[in-house]
Image (tube, rainbow, N blue to C red):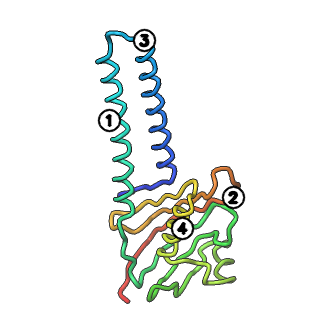
Amino acid sequence: MHAVRTTATATATATATATAIATAIATATATATAVRTRHRPLRVAAVAVLLTGAAAACGTESAERAVSTAPWAEPSSYSYTLESSKGERALIGRFRVTVREGEVAQAVGLDESGKRVVRRSLGDVPTIGGLLEQWKRARAEGAHAAEVEYADDGHPVRISLDQEENAIDDEALYVISDYEPTAP
């Protein structure tokens, strides 16, 4: 399986790196202004290396985001196993889910938590597309972390969400396995 990961924290890391580089450049410039030495070519080379590293880091993040957000065409009918954990949420447990015509047609709880969710409401169990919508919404709302890992065929296999860094029990982890597209 090939996994591609996107993270809201990658942006923060790139920003922190760029800030550190800008600080280093400003410090080098201030030092060069205050004390004129014969090592100007060395300073220029150091600044060039820092800028090249910053540009490369930004390029990597953009490329990663472009690859990882490539569209996955959700089929109208498929089945999958969902393990939903972390946080204080209604959707906790392990489920075998069957999707027909784009909607959950059947969900079977595979553990006690999953069985309780299914008894309470079949509508609480999402399609894979519904899970991806949660991820997109978390990213749009500036979640602390919103990660997706994809299989080689493009379907997601792991979605991890954390709305706020210091909040307790707001996380969500969805592990998708046994994915099988079926004929409608």
Residue 142 x/y as whole percent: 56, 58
Dots 3 and 2: beta carbons under 8 Å?
no
Q: Are marks 2 and 1 in contact (CB under 8 Å)?
A: no
In what element is the residue under mark 4? Answer: helix
Between circles 4 and 3, the one closer to the viewer is: 3
Q: Secondary structure at mark 3?
A: loop
Q: Is residue 41 left or right of residue 139?
A: left
Earlier in the chain: of badge 1 and badge 3, it is: 3
Q: CA distance from mark 2 to mark 1?
A: 40 Å
Location of mark 3 (residue):
35
Distance (Cα) linking label 1 and label 3: 25 Å
Count neighbours of disc 2 (C-alpha within 10 A) and say few if under 14, some if 14 to 19, many if 20 or more: few
* Horizontal side, residue 123 vs residue 38: left or right: right
User: Which residue is at a point 38% across and 60% down the rendered structure image?
Assistant: 68
Q: Position of residue 132 (x, y in %)?
A: 48, 70
Label 4 belongs to which residue? 137
Of the residues tagged 4 and 1, which is closer to the observer? 1
Number of marks drawn? 4
Q: Which residue is mark 1?
A: 52
Q: Amino acid at mark 3?
A: Val
Q: Residue at x 62, y 59 (%)?
A: 171
User: Which quadrant of the view contains residue 71?
Assistant: bottom left
Labels 3, 2: front one: 3
